[in-house]
């Protein structure tokens, strides 16, 4: 079917269906072929009977809802997704479709509700992270987009969407960390952005005391502010944002975050696992490489064996997110 021979594929699928009529897979694949032909009525006619079978699954409700939507009946699409969500409450694919319906209505807050619910109930399904990250990275609450986005890149590797989010993560770092002059920098990953002033002429102890006083004064109970302050500590000493400095910042951030006894985040736990295996530098270049351009290429070329060792380890040690470890915004807001 992928080579464009849709009708030929349908003939073969119908033959297989006759030999095993109880197998939903053949009917589903025929429906998928009709969907690619934009014959949405045929898709609906094929899939509706499957929803009454015991071995129905969430994918059937997903494609059925899509067929209603693309066929010009968004109300029926919404009803289909919601019925599927009641039967399959842990199916992240249905939450992302339901959220997309709200995006089409330009209600991004409602869309986020569904995307983040999808993350909560199905934390290994990538598309909800992708959608939530894009919304937050285009807002004044980038902290959530930074974490959602990096989790997404880990779950869905080496796709066009991965490249897109990698670039957004890098440009957000570049845009939200500003060195205003030689003695100060501003960090803005949430509404209450943090500006730190450093006096290079002061004694080291005085500089540290001044830094801690500014952070204490800026501290609020919001998770975003705590994240932002930990990031500010990790940035101290840097003068520019590029892949090399971000590698150092991200490394220090893990220590600062842990030392400040902030809430456990599955992504940061995974990064520490990567660091313990000796691969954090390569991982940091990998996660941001799509926007790193020549700098990323030069680093990989100069560290060929280190890169190969990381890729081999990374292939066999994927992030694993259990439901109780899921990262979603409301969990962290409620805890503060």
Image: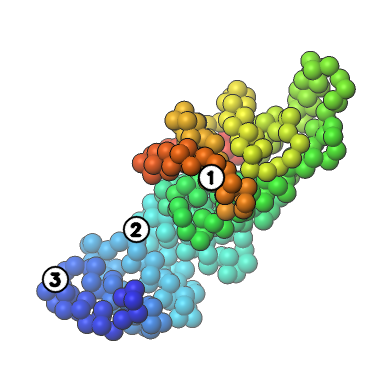
CA distance for labels 3 and 1: 51 Å
Q: Which mark is residue 20?
A: 3
**Residue 7, percent from left and from top:** 28, 84
Few, some or many residues within 10 Å of mark 1 (<14, 14–19, 20+): some
Q: Secondary structure at mark 3?
A: loop
Q: Secondary structure at mark 2?
A: helix
Name the residue located 37 percent from the left edge and 62 percent from the top edge: 84
Foreground residue, 75 or 21? 21
The residue that label 2 is drawn on is 87
**Residue 309, percent from left and from top:** 42, 38
The outermost residue toward the right is 201
Name the residue located 67 percent from the left edge and 37 percent from the top edge: 245
Name the residue located 27 percent from the left edge and 63 percent from the top edge: 56
CA distance for labels 1 and 2: 47 Å
Give above or below for 188 relative to 184: below
Name the residue located 34 percent from the left edge and 64 percent from the top edge: 59
Q: Is residue 39 left or right of residue 230?
A: left
**Residue 185, percent from left and from top:** 79, 37
Specify which label sits upstream in the sequence, 1 or 2: 2
Specify which label sits upstream in the sequence, 3 or 1: 3
The residue that label 1 is drawn on is 300
Q: Which mark is residue 74?
A: none
């Amino acid at each position: 079917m992928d080579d464009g021979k849709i009708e030929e594929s349908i003939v073969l699928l119908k033959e297989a269906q006759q030999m095993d009529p109880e197998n939903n897979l053949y009917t589903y694949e025929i429906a998928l072929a009709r969907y690619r032909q934009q014959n949405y009525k045929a898709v609906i006619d094929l899939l509706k009977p499957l929803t009454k079978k015991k071995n129905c699954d969430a994918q059937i409700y997903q494609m059925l809802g899509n067929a209603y939507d693309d066929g010009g009946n968004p109300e029926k699409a919404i009803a289909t997704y919601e019925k599927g969500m009641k039967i399959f409450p842990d199916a992240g694919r249905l939450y992302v479709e339901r959220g997309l319906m709200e995006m089409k209505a330009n209600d991004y807050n409602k869309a986020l509700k569904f995307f983040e619910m999808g993350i909560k109930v199905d934390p290994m399904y990538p598309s909800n992270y992708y959608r939530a990250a894009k919304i937050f990275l285009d807002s004044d609450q980038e902290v959530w987009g930074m974490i959602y986005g990096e989790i997404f890149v880990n779950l869905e590797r080496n796709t066009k969407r991965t490249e897109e989010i990698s670039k957004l993560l890098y440009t957000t770092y570049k845009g939200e960390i500003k060195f205003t002059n030689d003695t100060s920098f501003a960090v803005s990953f949430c509404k209450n952005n943090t500006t730190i002033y450093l006096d290079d002429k002061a004694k080291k102890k005085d500089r540290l005391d001044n830094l801690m006083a500014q952070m204490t004064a800026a501290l609020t109970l919001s998770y975003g502010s705590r994240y932002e302050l930990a990031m500010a500590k990790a940035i101290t000493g840097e003068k520019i944002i590029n892949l090399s400095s971000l590698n150092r910042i991200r490394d220090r951030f893990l220590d600062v975050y842990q030392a400040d006894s902030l809430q456990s985040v599955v992504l940061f736990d995974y990064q520490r696992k990567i660091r313990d295996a000796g691969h954090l530098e390569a991982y940091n270049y990998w996660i941001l490489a799509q926007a790193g351009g020549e700098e990323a290429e030069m680093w990989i070329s100069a560290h060929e064996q280190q890169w190969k060792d990381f890729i081999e380890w990374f292939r066999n040690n994927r992030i694993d997110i259990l439901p109780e470890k899921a990262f979603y915004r409301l969990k962290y807001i409620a805890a503060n």
